[in-house]
Amino acid sequence: MIIIDRFEEDIAVLETDNGMTEINRFYLPENAQEGDVLINDGEEWIIDHETTEKRRNEMREKLRRLMNND
């Protein structure tokens, strides 16, 4: 899984299964955000909206449980 960790000016820092890597932000979709899950089809980077939303929901649920001590 490849996730956008953060942006540093024109650089996107990506979290991969093999650690962190950087690419020029130019190669990502204009609407890419921190936390988005990405797919590279060999020609372009695509946001995996379904996996991104699922991951965000899981993170919200974990935070909710932590805040409520469940």
Image: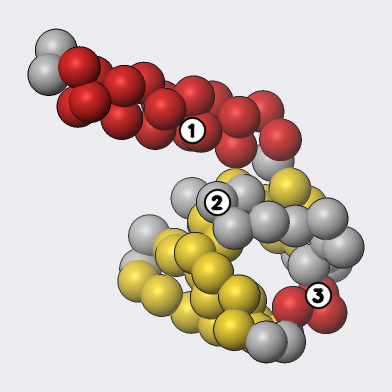
- Residue, disc 3: 27
Residue at the (12%, 19%) spot, across then down:
69
Q: Could you say whether the residue bearing mark 2 is in a helix, strand or loop?
A: loop
Can you name the residue that lies furthest to the left here?
69
CA distance for labels 1 and 2: 9 Å
Q: Quadrant of the C terminus?
A: top left
Nearer the viewer's eye, disc 1 or disc 3? 1
CB-based contact (under 8 Å), mark 1 and mark 2: yes
**In the rendered image, which quarter is residue 29 located in?**
bottom right
Give the residue at x 31% y 30%: 63
Q: State the residue position of label 1.
A: 55
Residue 37, position as x, y percentages in the image: 59, 48
Q: Amino acid at mark 2?
A: Gly
Q: Compare marks 3 and 2 and give the one earlier in the sequence.
A: 3
User: Residue 6 vs residue 24: left or right?
Assistant: left
Mark 2 Cα within 10 Å, few/some/many (few <14, many 20+)?
some
The residue identified by callout 2 is 35
